[in-house]
Image: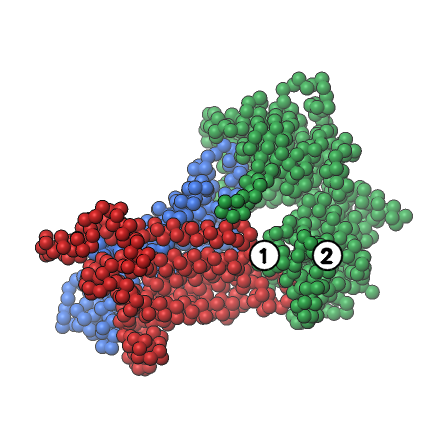
Chain colours: A blue, B red, C green
């Protein structure tokens, strides 16, 4: 597939002004920053200790003391959501890191070399794409047992071909441009051109894809933990909290509602951020406004 | 045209073979001794040796792979260790739940998404578009299993319209069986529909900026006719790509959703097999799902050629 | 009575004024030329008549078409007019047709929509129309897809769509700008005939005065959204009363002053002994044919076919040919960006074909390039200093930062830019300035040869004249040799000593520029010369016709 996009031609200051007048970006940025802040605060302080089980306080409805209620072990759900944020972000971030770290060089290499190398990279992509994140997680857990690390690896592996594809498509759109020919006429090699001209021009594409994969990573981690293949108790995680809530839906619906809302808000924030970045940096969308 | 078809077919076959090697490697080589893994640490050496013989683990690696792969081709997936029945029987029993579920969900998502995408693209930047895309943005962010829980709470616990879970089997009557698939299908479809609607809209908007749209307008076609006759077909390629990817996600999604609704499908089978360390079932079902994903991607590649005449004449 | 009457048309997009008080009329059967440089508002004027403007555009004034008030008409009324009474042809034939529909469907679509004809009848009429525009059914059945046609053929399909229902008014917006001169002449002939046959009014929009002069009865000259001058074509252009009209006309015919022309080489046997700078010896370049099936491949296409020539130091040579004749492929091989299938290229006596990038470094120092697109040839993420300094990469000894800035400043000065421009980004420059940057980049290593691929064809005429002057000046000052790749004979005439005519991969004629262009010998050269629009000639012909 070919990809067409215009390279934005603006200074950093212009972009900043636009960013903070863009509704999507601003909302997404605020939400994401808030979630990140909550995760950081949870290292130092939570309203209640999430490792202490107080059976006397079990399944309490939301109240001024326990804002989001308590779970079946009497733990404060708000505190658990705070700690869970840390966990979700960590898993998704590392998974995106793996995807970018391996996928982008592969995609850039495929675009620069073409021919057999390109073909090999693309076939490798097809292969990984045949294993959706959950399937690879299943295989990994079948051997190594469940755990957060395995979830990270499974999601990360699935991210590799995504970034490889985006990087390759972006780079293929840059290579035929005249400024690349000019660099070649100046005697620059493919590696140097990739570093100096190609990658800087596809950074925005990668950034947008990064936020999308980050959001997907949070969803995937929640899913894996929900079926017991991801983060293991007693470490609180949003997916695991939902699993615990399932059998108690009638008695304690708040146990299901709040962790789910946490996921929705976080993913929404990241997606808005990604949309915002795409809006700001893509001159085509500007033309239509 | 034929060159394109043959190339895609060849790629699909190569991918399939490579995927089978990966599955085999991960599940039969990495564990060292699969028999020991399946039986656990408490099993005696004799028990392990018995299973090793049963599974043919004492044969050379290449031979084992060929034997396994040959079995897959002749639909002989081996015998489940925990159920003591041929895996193919388990698969046959479960696929009649999973496949209809995935197909209903895919159909539902397409039926919702394409009209919404057309509606939004036609009103680009206006109130209707903003509302529809706001809803889609929210839909993308909702995890399907949580959405499923909320649906159960609303429709099964409160309104008691449909069962909260379980599957009565097709023998209980098509309508009754379908009824128990309604909530799972909706839970699977809506988040996917949200993604697809966004992709459809942005593909359409990009196409609407093309020169040939202006040519069509200059012919005197009203905007609506241009949208349907000229824009939609050109926007199909990205939409088809996403549809293909979504099928993979839906298949994977069924694994979780079947667990939420206690549906006896392939997902639940593979999930239980993991907890019971029944590697034979795991590798067969994983391979089956992977094959399905590859087959759908091949179909998507072929449908590109139907949509785009340029692919038919190029290689 | 006029067919189209535009009165006091003003238009804004957002807060930006685009047109102010534009007046224009077209009578039935009349050809009105609308001329202006980029950004003058000529395309927007056309789109306003069609009411195909972007959402944010607000128009005021009056447009009357055949008694209908266009600006007040409902969308339904406009749909009835578009394609039926007003047809439109666009600039870019490569993208103007829907790639997934056959040409038959696309021509028949408008016919069916407006006349409610049956599919068979509509296809019948579409067939006749395609025959009329020069796409006979034997080679171009209705079932052809756009990608199977060339640019010129596609433009014929677009014209067939626009004229299928014999509209009263045809609007053609730069209909030939994307085509080479020979195709341009053919398409203009076709338009002229269709207009005469059906007594259509034609609003011909173009940046090219020569084209408009050949075609139009009257012209309107637009600048920054305002009408500068309007009137009878021949009189307006021969009298050149308005200063802007004069400026445009003179820029179109501009020939840079060149004190010393370089007359060595083949025409001058005495100097044959001088060592040539560039020698191209029997160079051929094949591209592998399309794969037809898994095992079969079509025969390879020969883009460049056994080409030999040489260029002396300081000589300015034009390589002229129609699009697709292989001239750009040849240029890429000379620049060692692509290797020939066979043959050798020597630069300063050394073979540069089949060499590694490291071995090429000394050659690259003395050989630079200027590209066509002033927008695409700079990395938008880098500042001018880095961009202009890029060729310094090939220097033996890397300059220090201070040395580098000095070199860049000097190169910028030489092309008429200031040292302050070093810290700007390319988007802060206009098209003409960017082409100056491009030239600065090309001369920073003091090369012996600059290959320029259509360096002025994307520029407006007034800017083009300035850039040609700059090329001429640098040729004198630095003694640099040029290889100009162009399809535009006026450019070749303006600044080159020698011309090579390329056709179907071969060089078919070479000689002194004035001799080849005034007395072409080969068929290809004759065709090019005959088709090339020439303002002098066009005005003379017009005056003669009018007596």
- Left or right: residue C136 compared with residue C414: right
Q: Secondary structure at mark 2?
A: helix
Looking at the image, is C125 positioned above or below residue C193? below
- Left or right: residue B179 compared with residue A251: right
Residue at 22% across, 61% down: B80
Looking at the image, is A13 positioned above or below residue A219? above
Residue lying furthest front in this view? B74
Residue at 78% across, 60% down: C201
The verdict on a common chain for dots 1 and 2 is yes
Residue at 75% across, 54% down: C191
Q: Secondary structure at mark 1?
A: loop
Q: Quadrant of residue B146?
A: bottom left
Give x and y (percent) for residue B304: 49, 57
Is residue C14 visible from the viewing direction of this image? yes
Count of number-bearing discs? 2
* Circle 1 chain: C
Give x and y (percent) for residue A97: 33, 49
Q: Which label belongs to residue C99?
A: 1
Q: Where the N terminus of chain C falls, by quadrant?
A: bottom right
Say few, some or many: other residues with alpha carbon within 10 Å of mark 1 (under 14 / 14 to 19 / 20 or more): many
List the residue tagged with mark 2. C131
> How far separated are the C-alphas under marks 1 and 2?
21 Å
* Circle 2 chain: C
Residue at 60% across, 52% down: C147
Give x and y (percent) for residue C318: 67, 33
């Amino acid at each position: 597939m070919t990809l067409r996009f215009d390279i934005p031609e603006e200074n950093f200051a212009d972009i900043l002004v636009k960013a903070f007048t863009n509704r999507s970006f601003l909302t997404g940025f605020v939400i994401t920053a808030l979630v990140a802040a909550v995760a950081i605060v949870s290292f130092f302080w939570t309203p209640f200790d999430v490792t202490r089980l107080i059976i006397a306080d079990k399944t309490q409805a939301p109240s001024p003391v326990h804002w989001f209620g308590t779970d079946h072990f009497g733990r404060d759900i708000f505190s658990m959501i705070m700690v869970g944020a840390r966990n979700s972000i960590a898993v998704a971030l590392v998974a995106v890191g793996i995807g970018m770290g391996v996928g982008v060089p592969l995609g850039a290499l495929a675009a620069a070399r073409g021919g057999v190398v390109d073909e090999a990279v693309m076939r490798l992509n097809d292969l990984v794409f045949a294993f959706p994140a959950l399937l690879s997680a299943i295989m990994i857990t079948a051997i190594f047992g469940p755990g957060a690390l395995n979830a990270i690896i499974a999601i990360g592996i699935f991210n590799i071909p995504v970034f490889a594809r985006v990087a390759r498509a972006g780079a293929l759109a840059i290579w035929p441009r005249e400024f690349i020919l000019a660099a070649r006429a100046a005697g620059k090699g493919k590696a140097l051109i990739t570093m100096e001209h190609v990658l800087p021009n596809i950074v925005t594409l990668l950034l947008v894809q990064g936020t999308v994969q980050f959001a997907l990573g949070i969803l995937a981690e929640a899913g894996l933990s929900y079926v017991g293949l991801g983060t293991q108790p007693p470490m609180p995680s949003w997916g695991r909290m939902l699993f615990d809530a399932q059998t108690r839906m009638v008695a304690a619906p708040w146990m299901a509602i709040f962790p789910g809302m946490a996921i929705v808000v976080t993913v929404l924030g990241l997606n808005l951020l990604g949309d915002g970045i795409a809006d700001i940096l893509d001159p085509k969308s500007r033309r239509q406004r | 045209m034929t060159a394109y078809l043959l190339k895609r077919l060849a790629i699909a076959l190569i991918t399939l073979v490579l995927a089978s090697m990966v599955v085999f490697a991960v599940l039969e080589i990495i564990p060292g001794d699969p028999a020991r893994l399946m039986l656990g640490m408490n099993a005696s050496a004799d028990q392990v040796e018995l299973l090793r013989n049963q599974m043919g683990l004492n044969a050379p690696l290449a031979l084992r792979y060929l034997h396994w792969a040959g079995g897959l081709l002749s639909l002989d997936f081996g015998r489940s260790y925990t159920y003591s029945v041929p895996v193919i029987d388990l698969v046959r029993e479960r696929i009649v739940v999973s496949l209809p579920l995935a197909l209903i969900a895919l159909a539902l998502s397409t039926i919702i998404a394409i009209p919404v995408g057309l509606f939004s693209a036609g009103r680009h930047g206006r109130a209707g578009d903003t509302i529809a895309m706001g809803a889609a943005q929210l839909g993308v962010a909702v995890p399907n299993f949580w959405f499923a829980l909320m649906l159960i709470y609303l429709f099964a616990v409160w309104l008691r319209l449909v069962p909260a879970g379980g599957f009565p089997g097709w023998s209980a009557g098509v309508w009754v069986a379908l009824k128990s698939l309604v909530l799972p299908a909706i839970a699977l479809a809506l988040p996917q529909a949200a993604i697809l609607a966004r992709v459809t809209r942005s593909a359409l908007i990009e196409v609407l900026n093309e020169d040939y749209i202006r040519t069509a307008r200059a012919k005197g076609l009203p905007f609506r006719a241009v949208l349907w006759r000229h824009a939609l077909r050109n926007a199909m390629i990205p939409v088809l790509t996403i549809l293909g990817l979504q099928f993979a996600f839906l298949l994977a999604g069924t694994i979780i959703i079947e667990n939420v609704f206690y549906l006896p499908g392939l997902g639940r089978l593979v999930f239980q097999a993991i907890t019971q360390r029944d590697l034979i079932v795991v590798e067969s079902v994983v391979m089956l799902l992977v094959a399905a994903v590859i087959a759908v991607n091949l179909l998507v590649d072929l449908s590109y050629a139907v949509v785009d005449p340029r692919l038919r004449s190029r290689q | 009575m006029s067919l189209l009457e535009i009165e006091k048309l003003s238009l804004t997009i957002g807060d930006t004024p685009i047109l102010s008080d534009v007046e224009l009329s077209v009578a039935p059967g009349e050809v009105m030329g609308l001329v202006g440089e980029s950004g003058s508002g000529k395309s927007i004027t056309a789109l306003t008549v069609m009411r195909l403007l972007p959402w944010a555009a607000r128009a005021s004034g009056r447009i009357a078409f055949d008694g209908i008030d266009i600006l007040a008409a409902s969308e339904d009324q406009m749909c009835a007019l578009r394609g039926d009474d007003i047809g439109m042809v666009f600039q870019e034939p490569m993208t103007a047709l829907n790639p997934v529909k056959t040409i038959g469907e696309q021509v028949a679509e408008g016919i069916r929509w407006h006349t409610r004809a049956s599919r068979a009848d509509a296809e019948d009429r579409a067939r006749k129309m395609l025959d009329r525009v020069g796409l006979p059914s034997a080679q171009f059945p209705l079932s052809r897809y756009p990608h199977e046609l060339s640019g010129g053929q596609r433009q014929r399909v677009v014209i067939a769509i626009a004229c299928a229902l014999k509209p009263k008014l045809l609007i053609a917006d730069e209909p030939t700008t994307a085509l080479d001169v020979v195709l341009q002449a053919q398409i203009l002939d076709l338009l002229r005939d269709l207009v005469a046959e059906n007594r259509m009014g034609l609003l011909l929009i173009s940046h090219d005065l020569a084209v408009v002069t050949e075609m139009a009865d009257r012209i309107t000259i637009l600048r920054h959204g305002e009408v500068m001058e309007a009137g009878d074509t021949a009189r307006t252009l021969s009298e050149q009363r308005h200063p802007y009209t004069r400026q445009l006309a003179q820029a179109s015919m501009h020939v840079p002053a060149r004190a010393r022309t370089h007359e060595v080489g083949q025409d001058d046997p005495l100097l044959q002994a001088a060592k040539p700078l560039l020698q191209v010896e029997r160079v051929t370049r094949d591209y592998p044919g399309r794969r037809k099936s898994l095992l079969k491949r079509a025969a390879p296409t020969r883009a460049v076919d056994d080409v030999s020539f040489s260029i002396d130091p300081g000589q300015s040579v034009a390589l002229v040919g129609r699009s697709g004749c292989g001239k750009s492929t040849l240029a890429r091989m000379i620049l060692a960006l692509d290797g020939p299938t066979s043959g050798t290229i020597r630069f300063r006596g050394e073979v540069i074909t089949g060499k590694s990038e490291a071995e090429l470094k000394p050659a690259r120092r003395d050989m630079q390039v200027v590209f066509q697109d002033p927008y695409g040839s700079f990395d938008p993420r880098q500042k001018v200093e880095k961009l202009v300094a890029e060729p310094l990469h090939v220097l033996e000894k890397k300059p220090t930062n201070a040395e580098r800035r000095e070199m860049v400043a000097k190169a910028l000065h030489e092309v008429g830019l200031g040292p302050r421009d070093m810290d700007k980004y390319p988007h802060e420059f206009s098209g003409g300035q960017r082409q100056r940057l491009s030239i600065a980049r090309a001369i920073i290593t003091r090369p012996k040869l600059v290959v320029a691929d259509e360096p002025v064809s994307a520029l407006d005429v007034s800017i083009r004249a300035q850039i040609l002057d700059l090329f001429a000046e640098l040729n004198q000052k630095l003694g640099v040799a040029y290889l100009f790749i162009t399809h535009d004979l006026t450019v070749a005439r303006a600044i080159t000593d020698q011309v090579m005519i390329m056709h179907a991969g071969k060089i078919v004629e070479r000689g002194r520029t004035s001799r080849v262009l005034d007395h072409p010998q080969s068929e290809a050269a004759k065709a090019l010369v005959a088709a090339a629009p020439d303002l002098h000639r066009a005005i003379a012909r017009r005056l003669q016709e009018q007596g």
